């Protein structure tokens, strides 16, 4: 299944707790869309969040965010893992 990295920019009120909560909400609904969110990274100074997911499509990955917490990514990029 393809891997996708999504980028959320200028997230207001970004805290470690808020990112963890949003990720947990994604995990709670991801099975409905055949998606698996693996990890996330964030920079609270710039308000950026990066999420790595396996998904059948960009649209499926986006649907999980939409239903889970409503924070839609600014960009979703298909990526391949290197060694």
Image (cartoon, rainbow, N blue to C red):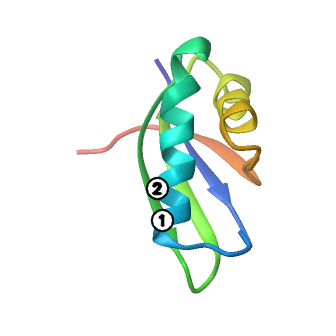
Q: Nearer the viewer, residue 17 or 80?
A: 17
Q: Residue at x 56, y 62 (%)?
A: 18
Q: Secondary structure at mark 1?
A: helix
List x then y, in percent, for residue 1: 46, 17
Front-most of 57 and 60? 60
Residue 8 seen: yes
Residue sitting farthest toward the left: 83
User: Could you tell me which residue is drawn at 68 percent across and 38 percent down?
Assistant: 65
Q: Which residue is labeled 2 in the image?
A: 20
Q: Position of residue 2 (x, y in %)?
A: 50, 24
Tell me if mark 2 has few (under 14), some (14-19) or many (20+) residues whose alpha carbon lies within 10 angstroms of its own. Answer: few
Residue 11, image quadrant? bottom right
Residue occupying image coordinates x 46% and y 55%? 20
Q: Position of residue 34 (x, y in %)?
A: 54, 14
Residue 46 higher or lower than 27, as above or below: below
Q: Secondary structure at mark 2?
A: helix
- What's the mark number on residue 65? none
Which of the two residues, 2 or 49, is positioned nearer the viewer here? 49
Q: CA distance from mark 2 to mark 1?
A: 5 Å
Q: Which quarter shows the C terminus?
A: top left
Specify whether 12 is left or right of 77.
right
Is 41 on the left-hand or right-hand side of 83? right
Q: Report if the CB atoms under discs 2 and 1 are less than 8 Å apart.
A: yes
Q: Is residue 77 above or below residue 21?
A: above
Mark 1: few/some/many CA within 10 Å (<14, 14-19, 20+): few
At 57% from the left and 24% from the top, the residue drawn is: 29
Location of mark 1 (residue) = 17
**Residue 35 image position (x, y, % from top left):** 52, 22
Image quadrant where residue 81 sits: top left
Residue 45 vertical placement versus 4 (above, below): below
């Amino acid at each position: 299944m393809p891997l996708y990295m999504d980028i959320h920019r200028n997230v207001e009120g970004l805290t470690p707790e808020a990112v963890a909560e949003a990720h947990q909400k994604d995990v709670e609904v991801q099975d409905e869309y055949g998606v698996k969110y693996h990890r996330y990274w964030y920079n609270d100074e710039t308000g950026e969040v990066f999420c790595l997911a396996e998904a059948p499509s960009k649209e499926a990955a986006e649907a999980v965010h939409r239903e889970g917490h409503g924070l839609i990514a600014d960009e979703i990029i298909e990526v391949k893992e290197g060694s």
